[in-house]
Amino acid sequence: MQNIFVQIKCELGKVYDVAEAVVDNIPEAEDVYSISGAFDLMIKFHLQDDDDIGRFVNEKVQTLPGIKDTFTMMAFKAFK
C-alpha cells in the first residue's frame, strides 16, 4: 500500500462542497483536513502499490467540481 497527500485549492465558496465530494466519491480518501495557507484542503489517500498516482490524481481528484489547483506529495515511510 502507498499513501499520498494531495493539497487542494478550491474555487471561492466551494471548500465544503469539494470536501463532501471527496468523501462521497473517492473511497481511497482516508483523511480529509481543512487547512490554512495557500491551499484549502489536504487529503490523505491510501492507494494500492500498483496504482498509478498521476492517473489517480488526474482522473479521480482533479475532475471534481470546485477544484482550482492541486499539489501532490508522496509519502515514503511512517514513523511512530
Image: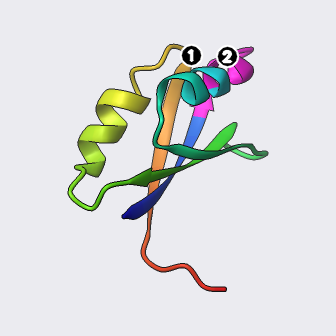
Kindly identify which residue carries mark 1: 66
Residue with the most extreme bottom position: 80
Residue located at (74% from left, 46% from top)? 37
What mark, if any, has residue 31 been given in the picture? none
Q: Is residue 48 above or below residue 41?
A: below
Q: Secondary structure at mark 2?
A: helix
Q: Is residue 80 left or right of residue 54?
A: right
Kindly identify which residue carries mark 2: 17
Callout 1–callout 2 Cβ contact below 8 Å: yes
Amino acid type, mark 1:
Gly
Amino acid type, mark 2:
Asp
Q: Secondary structure at mark 1?
A: loop
Residue 21 painted magenta: no
Magenta residues (range): 9-18
Residue 1: image quadrant is bottom left
Residue located at (57% from left, 23% from top)? 24
Residue located at (52% from left, 24% from top)? 68
Upstream in the sequence, badge 1 or badge 2?
Answer: 2
Q: Is residue 19 above or below residue 4?
A: above
Quadrant for the C terminus in the image:
bottom right
